[in-house]
Amino acid sequence: MEKKNIDWSSLGFGYVQTDKRFVSNFKNGAWDEGTLTDDAEVRISECAGVLQYSQSCFEGLKAYTTEDGHIVTFRPDLNAARMKDSCERLEMPVYPVDKWVDAIVSVVKANAAWVPPYGSGATLYIRPYMFGSSPVIGVKPAEEYQFRVFCTPVGPYFKGGAKPITIRVSDFDRAAPRGTGHIKAGLNYAMSLYPIMDAHRNGFDENMYLDPATRTKVEETGGANFLFVTKDGTVVTPKSSSILPSITRRSLIYVAEHYLGLKVEEREVFFEEVKDFAECGLCGTAAVISPVGKIYDHGKEICLPSGMDEMGPVTKKLYETLTGIQMGRLEAPEGWIKVIE
């Protein structure tokens, strides 16, 4: 299979239209069989539920070329399960988990020429999403839905290596207690756009959101979970019912415990503790881990001992181990790698 004639090393993290995408429609109480299509356009009513009341959710995962030349995806069953949770919370019909994974496989297979080669630093980003497509004028769920999957080749999130970033403690709340912070709803990301752009305008890379009830505990950023390392090498991640259960975070925790032999704690993390940590990172699909070097808190600076030059030693080991598993350089736990071809 001949690859597309692309300068893979020059790819950014943006949208490039590929050949095929998957589309399935929910109507009269059932999903159709779905199909691959060349058509990248979405046509819906001006009164569609997604446009009126933001009834939508999405996922993000990647396909890789491994060291031995296989195309694989990483733990797609967990993305399917998380979208199931999102759909149930938003009163949307669940797309069956087995068919969900099959749709991912079919899209990657149909776009195999777009999967970057091993060693290029690039990957194929896969975006499954669902939205209310039928007209809705009263405040209620739509009656019809569309589930779609497209993919796009992307370069490494950090060109030239992951340099530590500077974040600030936000005055905004990311999610309400007992709200929708634990699901991947589009509306969560819409409300985070002003805070992140405001952070950028003021010279910061990201926001640190605290719990909205007491504003004493660390939750997450607009699109990633936190991971901390104590001075004695313990890996700590915040536990809260209003943060998104990151698949990358869960995988890193497993790697820390079972590959690196580190002690792991998933617990409430009080902001007062942050100054005592040795390392801090933001974990998610796009970058795997973004190291944090400095946290700004309303005029006060917290400088992590790991510094602003490179990832801390524990964070780096976690990053290298997980990416080694994804790229086939290290043996993966059973069920983590879905071989496509």
Image (cartoon, helix red, strand yellow):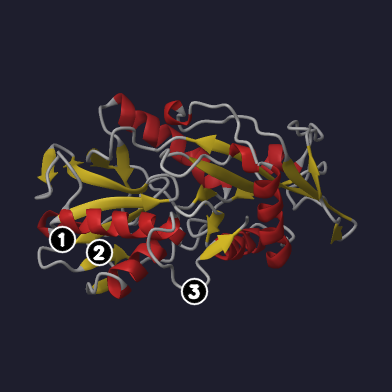
Picture quadrant where residue 321 is located: bottom left
Closer mark to the observer between disc 3 and disc 2 = 3
Asked if residue 218 shows in the view, the reply is: no
Residue in the picture at 25% in, 46% down: 291
Mark 2 closeness class: few <14, some 14–19, many ≥20 residues within 10 Å = many
User: Where residue 121 sits: x, y (%)?
Assistant: 41, 40
Provide the residue designation for mark 3.
334
User: Where residue 284 sits: x, y (%)?
Assistant: 41, 51
Tag 2 near tag 1, CB within 8 Å: yes
The image's mark for residue 273 is 1
Viewer-nearest residue: 23 or 37:
37
Between the C-alphas of marks 3 and 1, the distance is: 36 Å
Answer above or below: position of 77 versus 203: below
Q: Amino acid at mark 1?
A: Glu
Residue in the picture at 28% in, 68% down: 256
Provide the residue designation for mark 2.
269
Q: Amino acid at mark 2?
A: Val
Looking at the rendered image, the quarter that the N terminus falls into is: top right
Mark 1 closeness class: few <14, some 14–19, many ≥20 residues within 10 Å = few
Left or right: 289 as drawn, with respect to 80: left
The disc, 3 or 1, on the residue closer to the chain's N-terminal end is: 1
Answer above or below: position of 321 versus 297: below
The disc, 3 or 2, on the residue closer to the chain's N-terminal end is: 2
The image's mark for residue 309 is none
